[in-house]
Image: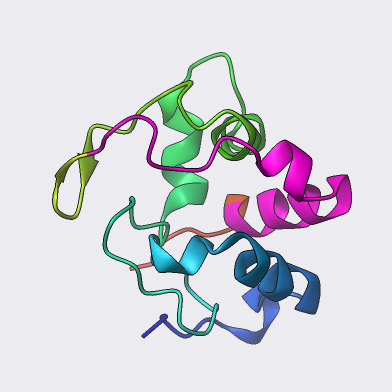
Amino acid sequence: MAASLPAAHEPSPLVVATVAKAGCGGCHIIPGIPAAAGQLGPDLVNIGATAATRKPEFSAEAYIRESILEPNAIIVPACPLGPCLANIMPPNFGQTLSEDEVTALVAYLANLQDEQ
């Protein structure tokens, strides 16, 4: 079950629809997204903080955008079931998602930070 978030961090209807359209929740845990409790891909609970550390020359937003549009650019080292693998995440979200959908998803994910 996806973690609950403060109201200020609730995903917009566009983000919820984009996650459903792309099937993100089948592989990733994404707080605030119904049924986004996948265990194959990296947990995205703290992606807003960790994204800024993955590629020094990239902001969190730039890293997340690249990860969505070019998922093999950087392979995260650890997934719930072991090392993350290349070619698991679909590489065609640049064609299947609109710019508005990608932008909304990037903005939402960039704001996810574990506040514990």
Residue 15, position as x, y percentages in the image: 71, 68
Residue 1, position as x, y percentages in the image: 36, 85
Q: Residue at x 54, y 64 (%)?
A: 23
Residue 66, position as x, y percentages in the image: 61, 30
Q: How many marks?
A: 0
Q: Residue at x 62, y 59 (%)?
A: 22
- Which quadrant of the rendered structure holds the C terminus? bottom left
- With 2 as the anchor, is 34 left or right in this view? right
Q: Nearer the viewer, residue 69 or 5?
A: 69
Residue 40 lies in quadrant: bottom left
Q: Residue at x 48, y 21 (%)?
A: 73
**64 to 33, vertically: above or below:** above
Residue that sits furthest to the top in the current view: 57
**96 to 39, vertically: above or below:** above
Bounds of the magenta span? 84-109
**88 to 45, vertically: above or below:** above
**3 to 74, vertically: above or below:** below
Q: Residue at x 62, y 29 (%)?
A: 59
Residue 31, position as x, y percentages in the image: 47, 73
